[in-house]
Amino acid sequence: MKRSSSSLLVATAAALIVTACGSSNSSKPTSNAGSASKSGNTTYKVGILVDQTGPASSTNKTVVDGVKAGALYAARQGVTIKYVVGDTQTSPNAALAAAQKLVTQDHVDAVVAESALAFAAAPYLTARGVPVVGAGQDGPEWTTAKNMFSVFGALNNTKVSTTVGNFFKMVGVTNLASIGYGISPISSEAAQQSAQSAKHVGIKIGYLNANLALGTTNVGPAVLAMKDANIDGFTASVDSNTAFAAITALRQQGVDLKASALATGYGGDLLTAGPGAQKAAQGVYFYLGFEPVEMQTAATKQFVDDLEATGVKGSPTYAEYNGYTSVGLLVRALKSANSTDKSQIIHTLSGIHDWNGLGLFGAHTVNLSDRTTLVSGVDNCIWFTKLVGNEFQVVKGAAPVCGTVIPGVTVKPAS
C-alpha cells in the first residue's frame, strides 16, 4: 500500500511526458495545440476540470496523475498531450469559472472532467462545442449532453440494476443501509439505486439517507439511526472521508456488519482519507468500474507501468483510472477522426461502440452512444476487492459481479 510521488521521470519517458500544469507556460495558449507537428505527431491540449481543493478533492484530485500516465500511452500512439488544470474548488460557481478560463484563456481542445460538480460547467461546455470526457459521477448531463462521454459509460442512476443487490446477497447481508450526498445528483441517486437493487433481491432496507452534506464527517445521527434499524450491511456513494467516518462510528456503536461496500477508497485513495483510514477500511469491500490492478492482467500491468514511469507508485486511485482512460479515449478519437477539429472529435466519439477502457474492462465493452441502458457500469458490471491487512484482495466470484436492468423500477431524480 505504500505510495509515493516524485518529480523525477525515467529517462525514456521524460522526452514524451506532458507539459505539467505547474510549468511556466502551462496556462498560456500554445501555437501547436490541436495541430500536427513537423514530425507528423499530433499535439493536443486538454483542460482538466477537477475538484483539486475542497471537500471532493480527497477522491478526485489525483486525476492529474492519471492524465500524466495517459500521456505516456498517447506518446506511444504518436500523440503529444499537454494539459492545464482548472480547479472547481468543489463549488458550482468556481466550476463554471474554471471551465470558462480553460476555454477562453487556455484555449483547450478538450476537457477531462473529474468533479462532483461538473454539472455546473456542463451547459457552458456544451454550448461552446467542447469535447468532454471523464467520469460521469455528478449529474445527468452525461446522458443528455451529446459532447460529453463518460469513460465507463453514461450511467442512468434513476434506473436500477440487480448488480449491487446481487453482491450483497452473495455476502449474506439481510438488512442494508445506504447513504449519498444531496448536492450531487448522481451520489444521491446512486444511494437510492443501491437500496432498490438490494430490495429487489430480498434484502431489507433499514436505513436510506441520500441527502448528506457534501464531504461531511458529522455522521453521528445517521449512525445511531442505522444502529436502531439493526442493519448488517452498509454501502456509501460518497467520498472516502464520509464513508470511513461512518464505518468507524458503526463499529464503535457495536454494529456487527456482515459487509460494507464503498464506491470510493480503493487503492491510493486510502492515503487521502485522513488518519486511521486504513484501520477503518479493514475488511471493507471496494467496488470499481475497471479491473483492479491486483488481477495482474496485461492491461492493469501496463497501467501500473505508466503510472510508475511518471513517479507514482503503489495502488492506483479511482481518479487515476479515470484520468488514464480519459486520455486513452481521446487518443482513439483523434486517430480515428484523423482530425483535431472539435466537432469532428465529438462525432467520432459518438461513433465508438466498442470502447474497452484500454483493456481495463476485461472482456466487456461500452457503446458510447448508449445513453439509456447502463446503470452500474460497463455491461452493468462491478469489480470488487476487499482490504485485508495491507493488501486489496480480489473477491472470488465478484470480479466482476454483473446484473440486469430491472424493468419498471426507478428512483426519483435528484437534479
Image: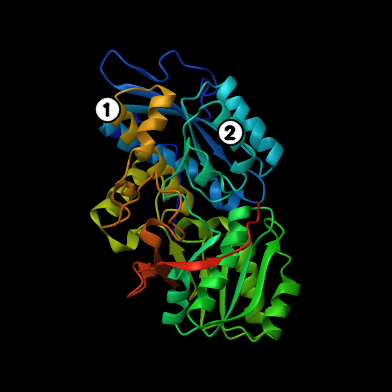
Q: Is residue 34 visible?
A: yes
Question: At numbered mark 2, what does the secondary structure look like: helix, strand or loop?
Answer: strand
Q: Residue furthest left?
A: 298
Q: Are marks 1 and 2 in contact (CB under 8 Å)?
A: no
Give the residue at mark 2: 86
Determine which quarter of the picture holds residue 399: bottom left
238 over 74 or under it: above or below: below
Q: Is residue 330 visible?
A: no
309 over 237 or under it: above or below: above
Residue 57: x %, y % from top left? 60, 48
Question: At numbered mark 1, what does the secondary structure look like: helix, strand or loop?
Answer: loop
Taking depth in this image into account, of 283 and 352 the one nearest to the observer is 352
Residue 368: x %, y % from top left? 38, 44
Which residue is found at the position 66% from the left and 31% from the top?
A: 97
Which residue is found at the position 68% from the left and 83% from the top?
A: 227
Give the residue at mark 1: 78
